[in-house]
Amino acid sequence: MPCQSSDELKALVIEAKKYTKDGKVADYIPALGKANPKDLSIAIHYPDGPCISAGDIERKITLQSISKVISLALVLMDRGSDYVFDYVGMEPTGDPFNSIAKLETMIPAKPLNPMINAGALVVTHMIKGKSIEERFQRLVSFIRELTNDPTVNYCEEVARSEFETAHLNRALCYFLKQHKIIDEDVEQLLDLYTKQCAIEMNCLDLAKIGVVFAMDGVDPVSRRQIMPPDIARICKTFMVTCGMYNASGEFAIKIGIPAKSGVSGGIMGAVPGRFGIGIFGPALDEKGNSIAGIKLLELLSAKHSLSMF
């Protein structure tokens, strides 16, 4: 079913787009620096099939940190929550997503949660498979199942750009390896992780993933249980407490829905029991979140009382 244009969403996009001038694209990853900071689009996917949208929702974007919540769901299904949370914590952090500070003071030195880079690297390390390619294909297959889109793949240019500039993530990996939280070759893990972050799709696909989480792991079209309800619940909880980097508390108060952002400017939202949201707005605020995308969600949440609190 095609996504129908919505006059209401168009008006909200026009209002929120004014804020793009205050943001900046993520040019520390050279390939992401090519984005147009004035872009803003949104798709909303409902459980019974229909979709409404505004803006250029067909434009491909890379998942970046949005992939963290998806890899977490896969690994929780692979290994169970007891195993996963032996190696990564469940607590929010007030530090930036790429900080090493808490690792140096925690005993044992495990990452605070799976939504910061250190925690996401540990989760990616846990994806099962005999090779990097097999592990990556398992993740891509899972994402294709969530989106019902067999064409989803990754952007080689972005993956290469991230791999070549991933100095801080290398430092995190070596620290984690020193403390026996991970035990594989750092360059291989970074190869897998940067490809994971470079998986690309459009806003409609993002909204499709959001609605699966919103409906407790059920694909609303096929009615198949893609992930167990408890895993969907765990992931949504992390999205609320840690999903918007170190702006998650303010986001919970002002908007109040489970959401995960990425430095490409993507936001995936899951309004429990109601619908999924996909947003693309590459101009970022100082925390690394889409500045206009957050404003758009704030307007939408206020207008339709979307907060779960």
Image: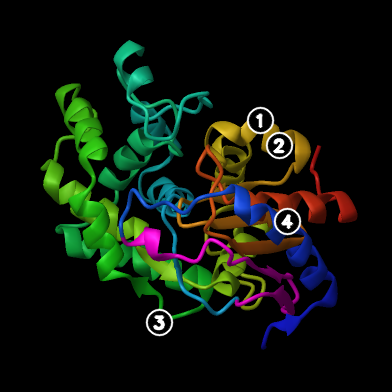
Residue 207 position within the rendered picture, expressed as x and y whole percent measured from the top left: 62, 67
Q: Are marks 4 and 1 in contact (CB under 8 Å)?
A: no
Q: Distance between the residues labelled 4 and 2?
A: 15 Å
The residue type indicated by label 1 comes to: Gly
Q: In which quarter of the image is the N terminus?
A: bottom right
Q: What element carries label 3?
A: loop
Q: Do the residues labelled 2 and 3 touch (CB within 8 Å)?
A: no
Residue 88 position within the rendered picture, expressed as x and y whole percent measured from the top left: 38, 30
**Mark 3 vs 4, N-terminal side:** 3
Residue 136 position within the rendered picture, expressed as x and y whole percent measured from the top left: 27, 62
Q: How far apart are marks 2 and 3 (CA)?
A: 33 Å
Q: Distance between the residues labelled 3 and 4?
A: 28 Å
**Magenta segment boundaries in residue numbering:** 31-56
Magenta residue check for 36: yes
Give the vertical position of 258 relative to 191 (above or below): above
Label 3: how many Cα within 10 Å (few below 14, some 14–19, many 20+): few
**Comparing labels 1 and 3, the label whose residue is closer to the camera:** 1
Q: Do the residues labelled 1 and 3 touch (CB within 8 Å)?
A: no
* Residue closer to the observer: 244 or 16: 16
Label 4: how many Cα within 10 Å (few below 14, some 14–19, many 20+): many
Which residue is denoted by mark 4 in the rendering?
Answer: 296
Which residue is denoted by mark 3 in the rendering?
Answer: 151
Label 2: how many Cα within 10 Å (few below 14, some 14–19, many 20+): many
**Mark 4 vs 1, N-terminal side:** 1
Q: Give the residue at x 71% y 36%.
A: 252
Q: Distance between the residues labelled 1 and 3?
A: 35 Å
Which residue is denoted by mark 1 in the rendering?
Answer: 249
* Residue closer to the observer: 50 or 245: 245
Q: Do the residues labelled 2 and 1 touch (CB within 8 Å)?
A: yes
Q: Is residue 197 left or right of residue 49?
A: left
